[in-house]
Amino acid sequence: MKKSLILILAGLVSLVLAAGCKNETPKSAEQAAPQQAPSAGKTGTVLETMNAAGYTYVQVDTGAEKVWAAAPEFQVKVGDPVVVPEGMPMPNYHSKSLDRTFEMVYFVDAILVGGAQEQAAAQMPAGHPQVAADAATAGVDFKGLKKAEGGKTVEEILGNTKALSGKEVKVRGKVVKFNAEIMGKNWIHLQDGTGAAGSNDLTITTSSMAKVGDTVLVTGKLTLDKDFGYGYKYAAILEDAKVVVE
């Protein structure tokens, strides 16, 4: 009987502790960084904005959805075009400072504001794809690298962009820079040892993953004068390419 009573009491204590954990209010962003997986970047126009506890909150209309994002306090106003880089999604987040609950808010290091190019450049996350890659710095060696069968070299592609515009091209090279999930894409800087400065680095967007030093076979359509906005324009780029790590 005594043993049964102890088991019953232990069960009751467990239930009380579980209920207490369930009702505990999660820490706010001002107290701790979110721990969920990062989301892809988004672009759009600011519909609403407010400041609280050192953060600026913005509601952004991407054209497909309306999302909330927050970053360390910055200057922005309704109607401004912005870029929200990858960040941490916080569902059902309650801001004590605003006394407001957001169905979803993305916390990021910085939000880029259009029309303020110097500010945007300063706030651009480290490793943004616009930054030129350096094979020597990356420690990439091109020895033994063979040209793709039926394909072209980086120098041949960048030296004949007008003739190849809109056409599918194949190239083998090595990844000298890789950036994941920027504006919803993965970015690769590809080199193969051909070409001089200005004609030796090919930018690629893809859904595939790779890492610096990988030898990859890339197939994609060449696009010229691609403008992503905010001063980020590419004279030539392979978009949504198929990338196979060899």
Image (tube, rainbow, N blue to C red):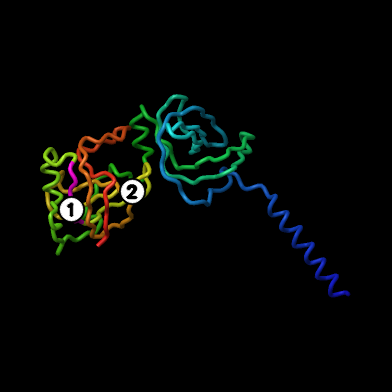
Q: Which mark is residue 171?
A: 1
Rendered location of residue 55, percent (x, y) = 52, 36
Disc 1 on helix, strand or loop?
Answer: strand
Q: Which residue lies furthest to the right in this view?
A: 1
Q: Nearer the viewer, residue 129 or 238?
A: 238
Classed neighbour count for the residue bearing mark 1: other residues with Cα under 10 Å, few (<14), some (14–19), many (≥20): many
Rendered location of residue 35, percent (x, y) = 53, 52
Looking at the image, is 172 positioned above or below residue 163? Answer: below
Disc 2 on helix, strand or loop?
Answer: strand
Reply yes or no: does residue 63 show up in magenta. Answer: no
Q: In which quarter of the image is residue 90?
A: top right
Rendered location of residue 13, percent (x, y) = 78, 62
Q: Which mark is residue 186?
A: 2
- Magenta residues, dominant SS class: strand
Q: In which quarter of the image is residue 82?
A: top left
Write the start and end of the magenta stretch as one range: 167-173
Residue at position x 14%, y 53% from top?
A: 151
Residue at position x 61%, y 38% from top?
A: 95
Is residue 77 toward the left or the right of residue 228 in the image?
right
Classed neighbour count for the residue bearing mark 2: other residues with Cα under 10 Å, few (<14), some (14–19), many (≥20): many
| Amino acid residing under circle 1 | Val
Is residue 137 toward the left or the right of residue 156 in the image?
right
